[in-house]
Image: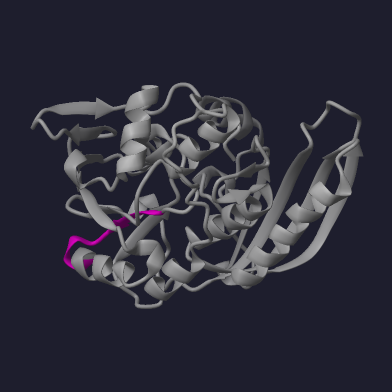
Amino acid sequence: MHNFIKETLLKKLNNPILGRLSDSAVIGCEGKIAFTTDSFVVSPLFFPGGDIGKLAIAGTVNDLVMLGAVPEYISLALIIEEGLGQGFLGRIIDSISFYAKAARVNIVTGDTKVVEKGAADKLFINTSGIGKLVSKKELSMRNISCGDKVIITGNIAEHGLAILAKRKELSLKLNIKSDCQALNGLIIPLLKQGWGIKFMRDPTRGGLATTLNEITEGSQLGIVIDEKNIPLSEKVRVASELLGIDPLYVANEGKAVLAVDSKEADKIIGFLRRHPLGRNARIIGTVVERPRGRVILRTVFNTERVLDMLTSEPLPRIC
């Protein structure tokens, strides 16, 4: 995906806004408006902790929040496979309505298309979102400097493993639920404090390790993280070992990675932990000058290994 974006899309479509490769674009009104778009093709449509409707709202909201914007408006486009029952679709629309209200965003426009049987695997959803920037400073990888701390807002790998267990009907008996949540209630109040947050990204496809690699690539610095500090539930740890999956590469849908000024890191952690969605927030690492463009994991055995970018998709169709 990264190669496709850089070698095909950017070569033909590049401009100063697109070239930043942010979760959202800053446009118009003296750079005070954030705009994002996303498509959701998850399988199965209903999973422990959520469904494709909740995922669409949370994913769109979170992309805006990661740029420092308060989400306000969302478009909703439905691509429906012929034969999908109205009761089934109604449950998803109910979910979209509920979670849009919970996130305080309005669905203001949309589109509906029906395709022939077998062309869409029941339902695909496309959303676009608009919000107003509230961050007092631009959130950008270019702001990151040596010594900055890296924070994760909670336990990792829950979404991808919940999807996998449901899709494959695995009898893990661990009851892992997706962390799918809109993060505006957690992050926006933090941004309004004006503390030293330099960059944020939600570690979705490719998980925490891929997101950290994106940060090192964009900042041209390195990151060293401590395995013992990475928040991981016992259920996820057991499931990952049973399935032979590295949780560092598993998708999340309700977490954020923050690069922050080291002087403000403890204060930010304290603020996050006062919110239910941030109670397991941790400082997991430090930005370093060398090795440039690399993520180094210090293991629990006091050894080090390189965390590379994910080179394949072990869990397809997780968002």
Residue 115 rendering spot, x and y as whole percentages: 89, 34
Residue 262 belongs to the span the image colors magenta: yes
Residue 281 belongs to the span the image colors magenta: no
- Residue 201 appears in the picture as rendered: yes
Question: Is 111 rendered above or below residue 174?
Answer: below
- Residue 205 appears in the picture as rendered: no
**Residue sitting at x 57%, y 31%:** 5
In the picture as drawn, the residue positioned furthest to the left comes out as 302
Query: Which region of the structure is painted magenta?
Result: 256-264
**Residue sitting at x 40%, y 24%:** 243
**Residue sitting at x 32%, y 27%:** 241
- Relative placement, left or right, of 3 versus 237 is right
Choose between 278 and 135: the one closer to the eye.
278
**Residue sitting at x 49%, y 43%:** 159
Picture quarter with the N terminus = top right
- Relative placement, left or right, of 174 versus 94 is left
- Relative placement, left or right, of 221 versus 174 is left
Question: Is 271 rendered above or below residue 146?
Answer: below
Picture quarter with the C terminus = top right
Quadrant hosting residue 218: top left
Choose between 48 and 213: the one closer to the eye.
48
Choose between 156 and 22: the one closer to the eye.
156
Residue 97 rendering spot, x and y as whole percentages: 72, 65
Residue 164 rendering spot, x and y as whole percentages: 52, 32
Residue 171 rendering spot, x and y as whole percentages: 49, 30
Choose between 302 and 64: the one closer to the eye.
302
